[in-house]
Image: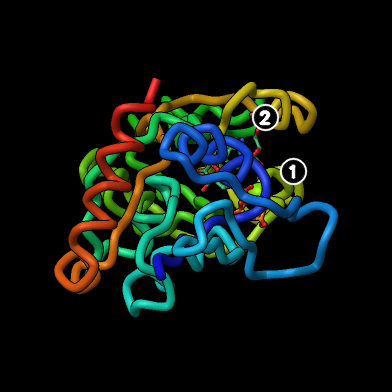
Amino acid sequence: MITLALSKGRIFDETLPLLKAAGIEVTEDPEKSRKLILATTRPDVRVVLVRATDVPTYVQYGGADAGVAGKDVLLEHGGQGLYQPLDLKIAKCRLSVAVRADFDYEAAVKQGSRIAVATKYTQCAREHFANKGVHVDLIKLYGSMELAPLTGLADAIVDLVSTGSTLKANNLVEVEEIMQISSRLVVNQAALKTKREPLRELIDAIASAIV
Ligand code: PRT
Ligand code: MG
């Protein structure tokens, strides 16, 4: 049995076509059922639904043999115990710095001021600002980052941006792109040995379906 860990929403939706190309179709709709284990058209393959940030943990400890996770999630997790054979080029976005329109980010950076930065992505943010030589006070949040500069909790945020409409709706402007993000296939390193044949087949089939 091969267990694949996916998160509901964009990752699930965008992984389906890749699985289909590999001859695997999920036979239940996660939006219409409360089931966390979904069967597929392949009796030896099942899908487990976990939170996006929990995918690397499930795969690392063997709760799943493989899974799909955003590069953002993998960088924050650290990637220990994970083989990352494929960039699936799905769920694309970018990790960026954003501020209130009336905050002069460039000037703050130039003056060497300490900048208060709220983010869920503390590892990526810490590394980015350290590389730039910018002093930051990082404030860890778990959601609604956009609110932080509006309430005075922080000067800036580091968050994912795709269309930019969330920033716009909250009067924030993107001032710096940190990196491009897409989702990766991750595989448990031990499973790669014990279930070598079926996992190799799966990886190859998915690889040839990436657009
Ligand atoms: O939502 P939940 O709390 O359950 O978990 P999650 O946010 O971790 O999962 P999900 O499904 O929202 O995101 C899973 C993965 O999709 C992320 O880890 C990213 O790699 C990727 N992804 C791609 C995105 C986006 N695009 C994206 N736009 N993840 C989040 N967003 C959010 C962003 O945080 C911001 O709030 O969408 C908002 C910005 O979108 P725009 O279009 O308004 O710019
Ligand atoms: Mg989300």
Instruction: Indicate the position of residue 56 as horizontal and vertical percent values.
Output: 39, 65
Residue drawn at (22%, 46%) of the image: 85
Q: Residues within 10 Å of mark 2 (few under 14, many from 20)?
A: many
Task: Give, as a three-letter code, the residue at label 2.
Answer: Leu
**Position of 81 relative to 119 (above/below):** below
Residue drawn at (68%, 51%) of the image: 27
Horizontal arrangement in the rendering, residue 170 relative to residue 58 (left or right): right
Determine the CA span between mark 2 and mark 1. Answer: 9 Å
**Position of 163 relative to 33 (above/below):** above
Instruction: Indicate the position of residue 110 as horizontal and vertical percent values.
Output: 33, 30
Front residue of 182 and 142: 182
- Outermost residue to the right: 32
**Position of 17 relative to 189 (above/below):** above
Front residue of 146 and 208: 208
Determine the secondary structure under disc 1: helix
Determine the secondary structure under disc 2: strand
Residue drawn at (52%, 40%) of the image: 15
Horizontal arrangement in the rendering, residue 149 relative to residue 91 (left or right): right
Front residue of 46 and 57: 46
Chain-order first, disc 2 or disc 1: 1
Does residue 139 show up?
Answer: no
User: Are the residues flagged by discs 2 and 1 in contact, CB closer than 8 Å?
Assistant: yes
Horizontal arrangement in the rendering, residue 183 relative to residue 27 (left or right): left
Task: Give, as a three-letter code, the residue at label 1.
Answer: Leu
Instruction: Indicate the position of residue 202 as horizontal and vertical percent values.
Output: 32, 47
* Label number found at residue 150: 1
Residue drawn at (20%, 67%) of the image: 189
Locate the C terminus and report the quarter of the image it occupies.
top left
Locate the N terminus and report the quarter of the image it occupies.
bottom left
Residue beneath disc 2: 172
